[in-house]
Image (spheres, rainbow, N blue to C red):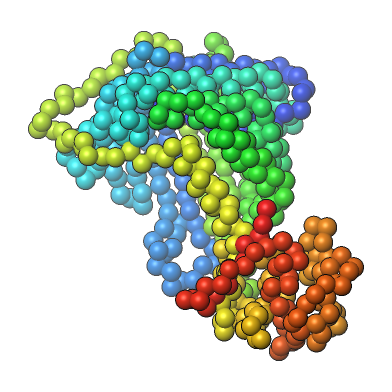
Amino acid sequence: MKKLLSVVVMVCLIAFWAVGCTSSTGAALSNALANAVNYKSFDSSTEVKFNIKYNNFPDADSSMKLVNDMFSNISAKMVQTVDLNKLQSKSQATVKLNGITADFEAYTTEESAWIKLPVFSRYLKFDQTKLNGFQSKEKFLAYQRQMPVLIGDFAKKYIQNYKFKLENIKDNGSVSIQTPDGTKNVKEIEVTLNDAQFKEFIKFGAKELLGSEDFKKLIIDVAKLLDEEGTAVDEELEKDLEEALNTAKEEVDSSFDEAMKYFEMLDKGMVIKFYIDSNGEIIRDDINLAFRVKQNNSFYNDSESQEEQSVDITLSIKDDYWNINKAVSINYPTFNDDNTILYEDYEGSRMSVKQMLEEYKEAKRRERISEFYIGNDYAFIKGKYVVMNSPAYNKNNTIYVPAKNIADALGAKVEGNGKTVKFTKDNDTLVLYVNSKKAALNGRDISNSFVTEVKDGTSMVPLKVVTQSLGAKIEWNQYSRSITVEVQK
C-alpha cells in the first residue's frame, strides 16, 4: 500500500499513550495528527539516517565485520495523491551506504507500476493487479481506495478519543524553519519517551490495541478487502482472527517484560518533533531514537562465559510535506519499448487471509513442540537449541530425559532435593521419587512402571509418565531416533 504519511505510523503509536488529561499542547498535537489522517494529496521528502554497531561479537564473523559501524543515508522524494478516483504516485530515492550511492525511481498509476533499479538502464513494468497479488483489477482498486479510508477512520477515532501525558510533551513555541515552500513560522511540539516510558507505552498501547473492538472490526474489514474471491468473511475466519488477537494480547501480558530485558533505549530514548503550521497541519516531523538489542546468550549453553553481545542502532527520520490537499501534478517519463521491460510473468506472493492464519496457527503450534534425540546431549526446546547435562536414553522401552529440560519443554517448574523430583504446572503437581517407581499426581499415587534415576548428578525422569500427567503428547520417530513432545492447549 502506498505511504499515507510516516506521521500516520506515529499516530497509531502516540494515540495510545493516554491518560485522559487535557492541555492546549496535547490538544494541538491531537488535532494536527487527526488532520494528517485526512491528507488526500501532497508532495513530500524524506531523509533517513541510521548506524549499526555490533558489540563483543566474534571477530571471525565476516558478515558482521561488513556491516559493523555502518552508516547509511537515504533521501527520498514523493508526490502522491490518494484521491479515491485518482491513485497515482511518484517516488525517487538516493541511498548512500558507506560511501556507495545508488538511485531508485518508482511510478504508479491505477493499472501499472514502473521501477528503475541502479543495475538497470531501463524501467521494469508491472501489472499493478498481479504485483499486489489480486486476481482482478476491480478487487485491487477497491482495496487501494478503501484501505486508506479504513485505517484513517480508525486512527482518527483513537486520536480524538485520547489525550497525552503532560510530562512527555513540550511546547517549544514558535520556530522558523526552511521548507520547500520557503521560510515558515510554525509551532514546534516535542514528544520524548525514555527507556522506561517507551516500554510502558508500547505495552499499554499493544494491550489497548489488541483488546479494542474497533481494531477487531478493522481487521475483519481488511480481511474482506483481501479476500480474492470477493466472498464475505465467514464465521470460522472471524473466530480464528479473534483467537489470534486474543493470543497476541495474552503473550503481551505473559512475555513482554521478559522480552524487554533484551531491549534498551539509549541516550534520550525516542524524541519526536512535530512542526505545525497556522492551518493546523503537520508540515514536518523529525524522529530520533537510539536503542540497544542484547543477544540472548541462553541460545547456547556454553555462551554464558562470553561478554554480553549487543547491537546498537541509531535512527533519524525527517519528513517534509507541502502542497497538502492541493492539486497534485505528477510528470511521468515517456515509457516505450526502448526504455521499458515488461515483467508480465510476475506472480503476486501475497497470501490470502486464511493462508496467513493457517501459517500463524502452525507457527504457534511449533512453539509448543520440543525434540529429544536418543544418545545425544542436545535437544530443541520450543525451537531453541539446548545442550543438556546428560543425554536422553532408552531403558526398558521408555525414554529418560533430564528433569530440567522436560520441565522447560512443558512450561513447568521443577524442584529436586535428592529424594524427590517435583513438577508444577498450572494446577497440577507431579512428584516422582528417586530410585523408586513411586509417583503421585496432586497428592494421589498413580501407576508408574519406571524408576526415576540420577545419572552423573542429573535427575533423569521417565518421559511418558511426566507428559501424560502434565498434558502433553509424545511421538516417536524411528528414522531419526528422536521423540517429539507437543504441549496441548
Name the residue rendered at 33%, 38% in the picture.
348
Residue 113 location (% of width, % of height)? 27, 29
Residue 195 location (% of width, % of height)? 68, 46
Please give left or right for residue 63 compared with residue 486 in the image. left
Front residue (pair 209, 173): 209
The relative height of residue 312 versus residue 252 in the rendered view (above or below) is: below
Question: Which corner quadrant holds the N terminus?
Answer: top left
Residue 15 location (% of width, % of height)? 65, 27
The relative height of residue 230 versus residue 350 in the rendered view (above or below) is: above
Front residue (pair 9, 175): 9
Front residue (pair 134, 161): 134
- Taking the view exactly as shown, the residue that stands out farthest to the right is 443
Front residue (pair 85, 420): 420
Q: Residue 261 is drawn in which quadrant? A: bottom right
Q: Residue 421 is drawn in which quadrant? A: bottom right
The relative height of residue 483 versus residue 251 in the rendered view (above or below) is: below
Residue 370 location (% of width, % of height)? 60, 66
- Taking the view exactly as shown, the residue that stands out farthest to the bottom is 456
